[in-house]
Image: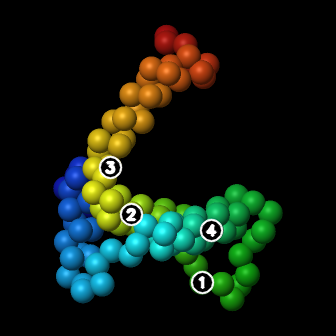
Amino acid sequence: MGQQKTLRDIQTEVDTYIGQFKEGYFSPLALTARMTEELGELAREVNHYYGEKPKKSSEKEKTIEEELGDMLFVMICFANSLNIDLQEAHDLVMHKFNTRDKDRWTKIEEK
């Protein structure tokens, strides 16, 4: 599907896209509302595929992949609007999981 992109590449790509519009990024509050909206759409798709609520025949076919992509786009917009480097944010979280939470879960035995 093309060459691999880093998180920084993706953030730059979104920033270039948003930068072509006078409106720029929405406010953090509006982006939080957008993330909530996208999360609801993702939850609806997950419920259709894995839950007890099948999709109506009149409903547009969407995929979990598409909804995750929408969620990711809004998260990147949110991070960009606050000058947060998602690669650094990821590294901070992984450090936390690998130190504070390192013994929280049962590890799979190595063979």
User: Where is 72 relative to 108, above or below?
Assistant: below
Q: CA distance from mark 4 to mark 2?
A: 17 Å
Q: Tell me residue 94's x, y (percent).
A: 40, 32
The residue that disc 4 covers is: 40
Q: Mark 4 or mark 2, which is nearer to you?
A: 2
Q: Mark 1 or mark 4, which is nearer to you?
A: 4
Secondary structure of residue under mark 3: helix
- Residue 60's label in the rendered image is 1
Label 3 vs 4, first from the N-terminus:
4
Residue name at image x 48 percent, y 74 percent: 30
The residue that disc 3 covers is: 86
Q: CA distance from mark 1 to mark 3?
A: 32 Å
Label 3 vs 2, first from the N-terminus:
2
- Callout 1 crowding tier (Cα within 10 Å): few <14, some 14–19, many ≥20: few
Q: Mark 2 or mark 1, which is nearer to you?
A: 2
* Quarter placement of the N terminus: bottom left
Q: CA distance from mark 1 to mark 4?
A: 16 Å
| Left or right relative to 9: residue 37 | right
Label 4 vs 2, first from the N-terminus:
4
The residue that disc 2 covers is: 78
